[in-house]
Image (tube, rainbow, N blue to C red):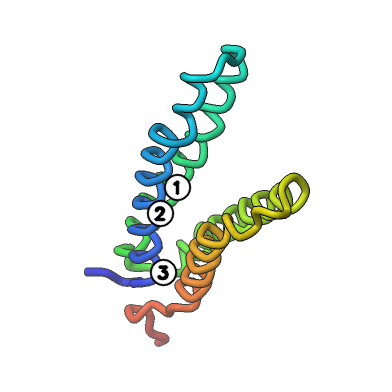
Amino acid sequence: MIKNYYYFIVGILCVLFALTHAWNGQTLVLSVFDTVPIDLNTKTVFHYVWHIITAENLIFGTALLFMAFYKDLTKGRLVAWLIAIIMMGRWIVILSFTLFYTESTISQIIPDSLAILVVIGLLILGTRVKSKDTHVE
């Protein structure tokens, strides 16, 4: 039985983000390197940096799905906070580099920003859920 629906929803979202990130990377972003002459080392770096985010999202999603079913919710709070902090750091990097290099395309990161902020918000709400099994004697 699901003990924390916030973690469950964020877990599903993170797994979906991982799948769409990998798919979009392969079909839209990274496929450009097949048509443009570019150094093999640069191509390799772009590919693994892109898929680091995919792996992170998949790991976050899997961890949160397990945490959603865990009976003692207090043990997962630190993990949820760490995931939220990593996601916030990721968002700050995206926003900073977009503003620094291509301020005119800030509107293009709005969907990513909203998704990240929703995930962070749900994670924080999930950390506030109390275990129903705990009782004081």
Query: Which picture quadrant has residue 133?
Result: bottom left
| 112 versus 25 height, above or below | below
Whether label 3 touches label 1, CB < 8 Å? no
Residue at x 61% of width, y 13% of height: 39
Disc 3 marks a residue whose amino acid type is Leu
Residue at x 29% of width, y 63% of height: 69
Q: Residues within 10 Å of mark 2 (few under 14, many from 20)?
A: many
| Residue 93 image position (x, y, % from top left) | 68, 49
In this figure, which residue is indicated by the disc labeled 2?
A: 14
Secondary structure category for the residue under label 2: helix
Is 24 placed left or right of 102 in the picture?
left
Whether label 2 touches label 1, CB < 8 Å? yes
Q: Residues within 10 Å of mark 1 (few under 14, many from 20)?
A: many
Disc 2 marks a residue whose amino acid type is Cys
Question: Which mark is in front, 3 or 2?
Answer: 2
In this figure, which residue is indicated by the disc labeled 1?
A: 57
Q: Quadrant of the C terminus?
A: bottom left
Query: Marks 3 and 2, how far apart in space?
Result: 19 Å
The residue at the far right in this view is 100
Secondary structure category for the residue under label 1: helix
Q: Quadrant of the N terminus?
A: bottom left
Q: Give residue 132's mark.
A: none
Disc 1 marks a residue whose amino acid type is Asn
| 55 versus 115 height, above or below | above
The residue at the far left in this view is 1
Is 38 placed left or right of 93 in the picture?
left
